[in-house]
Image (cartoon, grey):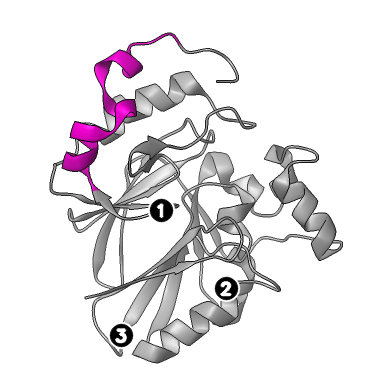
């Protein structure tokens, strides 16, 4: 198996590449922000292993995870999969950008940008199942970071966690469409039931495991999960 990661130049978003072997099909997760986009870096990595992408998965609609989705999909004529609640954000990421925030400021530096959907955008719902490039994938709706955040369990071996779960932390819930209360429900119902051996591939930062996070992550402990949720937290 081939598992590659490209950290995007902006916000160090992890773009994951899954393939069963060299000279095979593959899928790509969360192609993020670069100038002009992340496609050249992805193409270089694909050529190194002679891989053919057949789909991209999107964990949520924040622009640091979706910036290069349409260029990637159009470049390789592949579909993008995203939870239905965040599907509108591919073509209109400004819906949940903070005016004057770091990404909004960057876009002004980049110049006027227009975003469009890929030719094939597939909006899934909770517990959506699919096989891509020989990998069995189950998508789980896990709102909290955004209303349409999702995680993907791959072959019962990996958890593509997006910004739901990091090593020692979780994603912010104070951004537009985020919810501390929803995040706590997602952590309790979608993360804690997973097997300790599952390898966690977060949207930012290093890999970890469910077992390690269950033991050490303060946001997976009962005192946090049972604490009152404050709007904007």
In primary-sequence order, the first of circles 3 and 1 is: 3
Range shown magenta = 209-228
Question: Could you give the CA–CA distance between mark 3 and mark 2, rounded to whole angstroms?
Answer: 18 Å
In the rendered image of this protein, does residue 149 appear above or below residue 233?
A: below
Mark 2, residues whose alpha carbon is within 10 Å: few (<14), some, or many (≥20)? Answer: many
- Residue occupying image coordinates x 71% and y 50%: 103
- Which mark, by number, is residue 12? none
Quadrant position of the C terminus in the picture: top right
In primary-sequence order, the first of circles 3 and 2 is: 3
118 or 225, which lies in front?
225
Q: Position of residue 57 (x, y in %)?
A: 45, 59
- Residue occupying image coordinates x 79% and y 38%: 99
The reply to whether callout 3 and callout 2 are in contact (CB within 8 Å) is no
Report the side of 19 relative to 172 (left or right).
left
Q: Is residue 197 magenta?
A: no
Q: Position of residue 182 (x, y in %)?
A: 45, 23
- Which mark, by number, is residue 72? 2
Q: Position of residue 104 (x, y in %)?
A: 77, 48
Which is in the foreground here, disc 2 or disc 1? 1
In primary-sequence order, the first of circles 2 and 1 is: 2
Q: Which residue is mark 1?
A: 205
């Amino acid at each position: 198996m081939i598992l590659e990661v490209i950290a995007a130049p902006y916000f160090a978003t992890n773009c994951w590449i899954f393939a069963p072997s060299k000279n095979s099909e593959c899928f790509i997760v969360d192609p993020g922000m670069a100038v002009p986009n992340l496609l050249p870096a992805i193409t270089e990595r694909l050529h190194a292993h002679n891989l053919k992408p057949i789909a991209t998965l999107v964990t949520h609609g924040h622009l640091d995870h979706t910036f290069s989705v349409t260029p990637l999909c159009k470049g390789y004529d592949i579909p993008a999969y995203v939870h239905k609640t965040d599907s509108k954000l591919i073509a209109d990421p400004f819906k949940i950008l903070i005016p004057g925030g770091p990404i909004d400021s960057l876009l002004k530096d980049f110049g006027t940008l227009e975003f469009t959907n890929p030719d094939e955008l597939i909006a899934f719902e909770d517990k959506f199942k699919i096989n891509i490039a020989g990998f069995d994938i189950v998508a789980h709706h896990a709102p909290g970071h955004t209303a349409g955040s999702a995680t993907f369990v791959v072959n019962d071996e990996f958890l593509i966690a997006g910004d739901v779960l990091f090593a020692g932390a979780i994603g912010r819930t104070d951004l537009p469409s985020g919810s501390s209360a929803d995040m706590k429900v997602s952590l309790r119902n979608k993360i804690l039931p997973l097997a300790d051996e599952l390898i966690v591939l977060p949207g930012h930062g290093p890999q970890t495991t469910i077992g390690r996070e269950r033991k050490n992550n303060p946001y997976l402990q009962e005192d946090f999960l049972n604490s009152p949720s404050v709007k904007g937290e």
